[in-house]
Image (cartoon, rainbow, N blue to C red):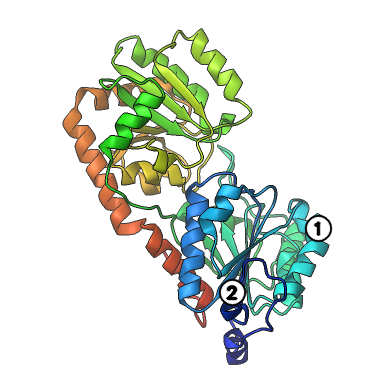
Amino acid sequence: MNSKGDMDDLDSHPEPVKGNPGANPAHGSRPRLMFVLGLAPQKIGGIEKFLRYLVMALDAAGWDSVLCFDGPIAEEFREYIAGPYVTIEPLSNQGNMGLACAGQLWKLLRKYKPRIFVYAFNGVIRCFPWLAKMAGCKRVFFNDHSSRVQGQRSLPLSFPKRMVARILTAPLTAIVSVAEFTRDTGDALGATSAPNLVIPNGVEVHPVDLRKRAEFRGRYGIPDERLVVTQVCWMVEVKGVEHMLRAAAMFLSKHSQAHFLFVGDGPELPRYRQLAAGLGMEGAVTFTGLINNPTEMGVFDASDIYCQASVWQEACPIAVLEAMSARLPVIASDTGGLPELVQNGRSGILVPVGASQEICAALEQLFADPDLRRSMGEAGYQSVLNRHRIEETARRYADVFLAPRPPVKLVE
């Protein structure tokens, strides 16, 4: 994949960067990895935590990091990830193959002189790989988090589109996908010949905190005796919140001891509040809006069952892993990469997409059997310990990025 000369270049130190905000002079002469992400960090969620662990793993290996984001960067995130080994830069307008931001990216590449370049979100077909190569980057990676529209089949691109895509992605060293589903659907397009490796997402693991459970419930007026069913997501149609609300209404018609919690903001939130009121769920449903750090605030500690009622093909949703790390049984749509996380009948229950009645039936099953809830929660917890610890995820990424040559296949 790379010549020995390339790897010698990787070990060399670029010139120090003048005016690197927050950089320690001791770190200024170290080699750098630049990670361009098509998102704007507004909270301390799963991706933000992963980035913190990744830059720390790279620091331990003697590398500095430059993170470039598309949109406003919350001060809370800047403080969370701050260190002498990481610099944050804005890089706006990353959509449309990256052409709108190409000039700005080129300036950043020339300023920081990274030896490794990584980009994520917005798709693999970008102008970024060639810009990175022309700027002297020795290795270029795409980090694929792609979910897919429900029912969409990944078919090969037409021959002309495939040839254009292959040209644009020719400098890629490898793709790192977060799920086998993502790898397989991405490979089916034929957009690149680069090897596609799988490293599933990871999460922090903490003991369940009963104090946080009580504080969170008290803050939102949720009675202690209620069984809380939670979904954490962006409030948009593809997350299946409407189907979850209809399942909740069915369930509450038989069981008044339950409470439904929806955590997150988004354009459909007003409509969902209105729907819940129309279904007669006042007093039994809570919409929190945006919570900057759900795990720290006790969202999962306060919950008893987690639901991911998505109506699109999720890749590897971190909220599901956070719920499993809190020993919660999971009800999830049987689509995309969700079956890779939730073992049906063992760590949770998989239901057909958009099937409110089946969601209600799964809730009935878990509500009636506390032992089943405990056993499924424990199985999910063990799965996280074995395969989804964030420290290990960050280490695997760093190993792939920095290794002399990535393996042809990797499924961790």
Q: Label 1 is placed on what type of residue?
A: Leu
Residue 11 can be seen in this image: yes
Residue contact at pointers 1 and 2, CB within 8 angstroms? no
Which label belongs to residue 208? none
Q: State the image coordinates of residue 349 (x, y, percent, origin top left).
A: 32, 35
**Disc 1 on helix, strand or loop?**
helix
Q: Is residue 219 left or right of residue 67?
A: left
Which residue is outermost to the left?
Answer: 371
Q: Is residue 362 left or right of residue 78?
A: left
Total label count? 2
Q: State the image coordinates of residue 120 (x, y, percent, origin top left).
A: 61, 57
The quadrant the N terminus occupies is: bottom right
Q: Splitting the image into 4 quarters, where does residue 319 fall?
A: top left
Residue at mark 1: 99
Q: Earlier in the sequence, mark 1 or mark 2?
A: 2
Residue at mark 2: 24
Residue 303 can be seen in this image: no
- Residue at position x 70%, y 59% in the image: 125
Cα distance between the residues tagged 1 and 2: 33 Å
Q: State the image coordinates of residue 323 (x, y, percent, origin top left).
A: 36, 41
The quadrant the C terminus occupies is: bottom left
- Is 82 rendered above or below residue 245? below
- Is 24 rendered above or below residue 354? below
In the image shown, does 280 or 90 lie closer to the viewer? 90
Q: Label 2 is placed on what type of residue?
A: Asn
- Is 400 rendered above or below residue 165? below
**Disc 2 on helix, strand or loop?**
loop
